[in-house]
Amino acid sequence: MNNSSSEDELKPKTWGGFWDIFGEVLVDLLDIPEGQRVLDIGTGGGSVLYPLSKKIGAPGRVIGVETCDHCVRKTNAEIKRCKIGNSVVHSMDAREADFEDHSFDCVTAGFIGWDDYFDFQTLEYKKPDELMGAICRLLKPKGTFGMSTWLLQEDLDWMYGFLSAQSIECKRNYHVENEKGWKKILSIAGFQNIHGYTRQASFTYDTLYFWWKEMMDYNWPVTGINSDVITESIKAAAFESLQGRLTETGGIPFRRDALFVIAIRQA
Ligand SMILES: C[S@@+](CC[C@H](N)C(=O)[O-])C[C@H]1O[C@@H](n2cnc3c(N)ncnc32)[C@H](O)[C@@H]1O
């Protein structure tokens, strides 16, 4: 029996999970009307782009830019399959984005990471911020900027703690940014009405295997690669340690917290 409805068939496939939850949050927080022209930096699996395309409707346009060619191909294929006529993704580094100056009403940047440029502990720049420079060039005066970043990723923290306890020297794999730093970045760049919002979400991975596969997308060991260092017996020990956390149906719930900052470019 085929249970899928035509609505499901036209629902774009994304990276799912937390990406979709927080993509929706970012777009909900944007106070933008239908018909706007929006740039989505780092579209990835489209978890921000798809809700944006709904929000700005048929008279609007969402243009994604993404440096990962595989993501660009996949997301454009979903856009086509789902007949989303107002959106497209380009293979392009946002820092070199080839669009006219001040040609976007809104720019979004979901989980791009700014800590290459900015030290969120000292609240000082480490180097010139080419990405914010590009955003300021592309955004219209009074245009809206919206971004998201991680504050906590319980599942990555768990892996880090577990692997460290197994004497594997590993990376923490995410860098925590903060609202204070973001307010400074945006005020230096000439934004006003800068507002931060923190949101928490819990997501249950259907199975430990599915969660483990996601975790293995991150390269954990400081030396070597996952497949050499993280052996089957380490995986079995991880599954054993997590037994007490499983839901009745064998799912594994984790929590993540994210920061969202929305700001308006000076007139
Ligand atoms: C963590 S993913 C987030 C995807 C999506 N924004 C979301 O919130 O679900 C970040 C994406 O940004 C892309 N990216 C990072 N820097 C970029 C840049 N300068 N220009 C375009 N894409 C970039 C990466 O390739 C990656 O796919």
Image (spheres, rainbow, N blue to C red):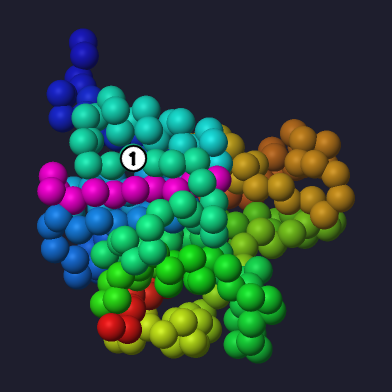
Q: Residue at x 69, y 79 (%)?
A: 126
Q: Is residue 88 above or below residue 25?
A: above
User: Residue 152 appears at what percent x and percent y?
Assistant: 52, 68
**Magenta part of the chain:** 57-67
Question: Mark 1 Cα within 10 Å, few/some/many (few <14, many 20+)?
Answer: many
Q: Say which quadrant the C terminus sits in.
A: bottom left
Which of the 4 image quadrants contains residue 74?
top left
Asked if residue 25 is among those painted magenta in the image, a careful observer would answer no
Q: Residue at x 43, y 69 (%)?
A: 137
Which residue carries the number 1 mark?
Answer: 88
Horizontal and vertical percent for residue 221? 79, 51
In the rendered image, residue 166, in percent from the top left (x then y), is placed at: 80, 54
The residue lying furthest to the front in this view is 100
Q: Is residue 132 left or right of residue 108?
A: right
Look at the numbered disc 1 and say if its residue's Cβ is closer than 8 Å to ligand 1: no
Q: At numbered mark 1, what does the secondary structure look like: helix, strand or loop?
A: strand
Q: Is residue 116 left or right of residue 52?
A: right
Queried whether the magenta region covers residue 59, the answer comes back as yes
Q: Residue at x 34, y 66 (%)?
A: 102
Q: Is residue 244 above or below residue 28?
A: above
Q: Quadrant of the N terminus?
A: top left
In percent of width and height, residue 21 lies at 33, 54
**Residue 249 visible here:** no
Residue at (30% x, 33% y) in the render: 79
Q: Amino acid at mark 1?
A: Val
